[in-house]
Image (cartoon, rainbow, N blue to C red):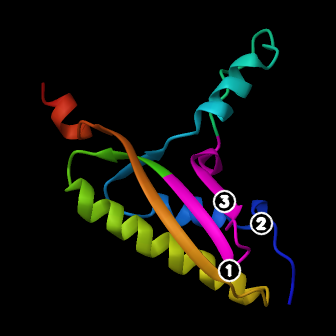
């Protein structure tokens, strides 16, 4: 069995979540936003945008039985939040399991989806 670190599948989880219709973005955790804010500013630099992976947290389950993955989503108002969160849950779980299987490291995966906010549909804003 291969040892897999969370960083190895954060991108896989982020990509799966962002592919769900109705997901506008992934919301970084407060600790990540604080670290970015505390980093020295570069003169003339473009403001730093958080990588999508910053909205995903992956930890070993306390009992060592697998992985716990938290996905923090910003949703568009165009779809029901519950339906979108369920689809994110299912797609992220399947993507991470597939990634682990490809690396001979099949383990249990628990996915938790948190909706941090919703944003207006782009066409609703443009239409006034």
Q: Residues within 10 Å of mark 1 (few under 14, many from 20)?
A: some
Q: Residues within 10 Å of mark 3 (few under 14, many from 20)?
A: some
Q: Residue 66: image x %, image y %?
A: 68, 76
Q: Residue 50: image x %, image y %?
A: 63, 36
Q: Residue at x 44, y 58 (%)?
A: 113
Q: Nearer the viewer, mark 2 or mark 3?
A: 3
Name the image quarter holding residue 29: top right
Q: Which numbered disc flags the more N-terminal residue, 1 or 3? A: 3
Q: Verify CB contact (< 8 Å) between mark 2 and mark 1.
A: yes
* Magenta stretch holds residue 26: no
Q: Nearer the viewer, residue 67 or 28?
A: 67
Q: Residue at x 81, y 66 (%)?
A: 5
Q: Nearer the viewer, residue 30 or 65?
A: 65
The residue tagged 2 is 8
Q: Verify CB contact (< 8 Å) between mark 1 and mark 3.
A: no
Give the structural element (helix, strand or loop) at label 2: helix
Q: Which residues are magenta?
A: 51-71
Q: Which numbered disc flags the more N-terminal residue, 2 or 1? A: 2
In the rendering, which numbered label is found on residue 99?
Answer: 1
CA–CA distance in space, label 2 to label 1: 9 Å
Q: Which numbered disc flags the more N-terminal residue, 2 or 3? A: 2
* Magenta stretch holds residue 66: yes
Q: Residue at x 62, y 84 (%)?
A: 98
Asked if residue 28 is positioned above or below residue 98 in the image, the reply reads above
Q: Residue 17: image x %, image y %?
A: 48, 61
């Amino acid at each position: 069995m291969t040892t897999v670190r969370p960083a190895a599948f954060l991108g896989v989880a982020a990509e799966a979540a962002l592919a769900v219709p109705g997901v506008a973005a992934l919301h970084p955790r407060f600790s990540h936003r604080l670290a970015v804010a505390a980093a020295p500013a570069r003169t003339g630099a473009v403001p730093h945008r958080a990588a999508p992976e910053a909205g995903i947290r992956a930890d070993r389950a306390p009992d060592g039985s697998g992985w716990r993955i938290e996905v923090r989503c910003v949703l568009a108002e165009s779809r029901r939040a519950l339906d979108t969160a369920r689809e994110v849950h299912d797609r992220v779980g399947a993507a991470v399991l597939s990634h682990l299987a490809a690396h001979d490291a099949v383990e249990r995966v628990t996915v938790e989806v948190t909706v941090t906010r919703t944003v207006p549909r782009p066409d609703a804003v443009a239409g006034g």
